[in-house]
Amino acid sequence: MDKALIDRPTGPAVVVQNSSAVSDQTQILVFPSPGQGHMSPMIQFSKRLASKGVRVTLVITTTSSNSIQTHANSFKVEVISDGSEQGNKKSETIEEYLERFRRVTTHTLANLIITKIKTSTCTPGASESEFKLFVYDSSMPWLSDVAQQHGIAFAPFFTQSCAVTAIYHQFHQGAFMTEPSATATMLLPCLPPLGIKDVPSFLYDHAKSYPSLFNSSRDQFSNLSEAKCLLWNTFDLLEDEVLEWMTSTLSRSIMTIGPTIPSMFLDKRFEDDLDYSFNLYSPNVDACMKWLDCQENGSVVYVSFGSYASPSKDQMEEIAWGLKNSNYNILWVVKQSEKEKLPINFVEGISEKGLVVSWCSQLQVLAHKAVGCFVTHCGWNSILEALSLGVPMVAMPQWSDQTTNAKFIEDVWKTGVRVKVNEKLGVATRDEIAWCITTVLEEGSGMEMRKASLKWKRLAKEAVDVGGSSDKNMDELVAKLEL
Ligand code: UDP
């Protein structure tokens, strides 16, 4: 990996050269959902679009307004309320949070649009509605109604894989409504045979059931026929068969625009695009890079469960001893809120061979030549990053779409192995975890996975580079905005 990539990011994320292909009036509104794994891809999408001359206004809510670095050169930011500033929201359940978020943003987004329309009609020469398109995270389907009420064309942006969406689609069309047995195999078009552990957890995992999340997995299909286009953070060759099937099933063309990784980690066309410009937590970049610089090539196991997942205390203990017993060097991200789950004196005990940090720049870590394996919870962004940077994986899915992503890592893209959960204990054991790590890192057993990872790294770069499938789709989108 180019050494420049692992230097610390400096300055603005992207300096955009406005192309003359689009008129000055071409503006779009982009509204990501506030989580780390939703903000990052839509911010990167905004930067790429801005590089093609489109003026982007990014709508963020009060919850995430402190975590973003703004970039006057690539997008404007408008902050709207999600109601979080009124009183103490810490005791809210997920269900209460989602209900409040939905209720408040319906109003505050409408107010923002009305204000913008008023401003533009008072400006001589400005068109009536300044926004040509409203792009929103498909997990917030109610927002399309707001755009429609104000006469603005809309497009959902899918921050999950197309395979996961295809499973939701078929489930909500009536497939497998009766819960299959633990050993049953589900056969769905264009997907590998799936067991109950391979489909998104919202469908059958009653212990972790959230009706609002289940409902939004259904509602994201409610208005697709009226959308101007469908945008997807994936790339054609990664999901070719399922993309083709979804295109014909929905009778809509799907615009793949991913992977939405900062340019300097992929095509390197935008030299200041080194990071996502959004961090929920402060990354401990220096400590990680200094430590990685001292390790041998391919010797480090990087471990992260993303921004949200929270394995049980028993599971954390098994992970800790599995990592230690594997005898490799370990860089483990354990969020501050999770640290109490670590075995006593574990951090001190591995100091010779390991580093535990509360957050890092994952892209810089994965791009470092010392990293040979990624133990991941299989969040969609983490997977796209590992594929784009050619790092083989140990898949330890926790919930949501991660289970399906893990299936694809092991059986379709063949870039890793999946940790088996011991059904009796309800956790993956230390021996199983250590075995998976060794399988990926050992010279012989890991060879095919390393080869496959390098293949996907090349294909991911080609997709976003000039003339690649995702780059062409971005051009097509810009052309659509002009119509
Ligand atoms: N991430 C990071 N530093 C960390 C851990 C994670 O920057 O220490 C980033 C990672 O690069 C990815 C995002 O957080 O872009 C996590 O998104 P993902 O979809 O993988 O999982 P989620 O957090 O949504 O469960």
Image (cartoon, helix red, strand yellow):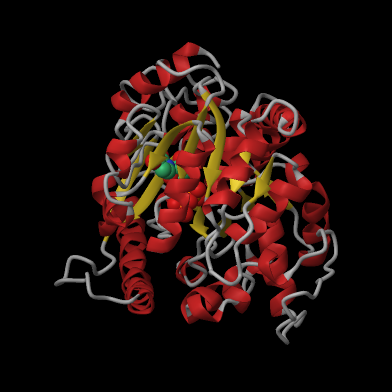
Determine the image quadrant of residue 112.
Answer: bottom left
Q: Position of residue 445 (x, y in %)?
A: 74, 33
Can residue 438 be seen by looking at this rendering?
yes
Q: Quadrant of ligand 1?
A: top left
Determine the image quadrant of residue 477.
Answer: top right
Residue found at x 65% / y 53%: 406
Can residue 27 be seen by looking at this rendering?
no
Residue 229 falls left or right of residue 248: left
Identify which residue, 236 or 214, lies in the foreground: 214
Residue found at x 55% / y 20%: 269
Q: Is residue 15 above or below residue 153?
A: above
Residue found at x 49% / y 56%: 134
Q: Position of residue 217 (x, y in %)?
A: 58, 71
Q: Is residue 292 above or below residue 354?
A: above
Q: Position of residue 479 (x, y in %)?
A: 65, 40
List the single residue furthest toward the bottom. 178
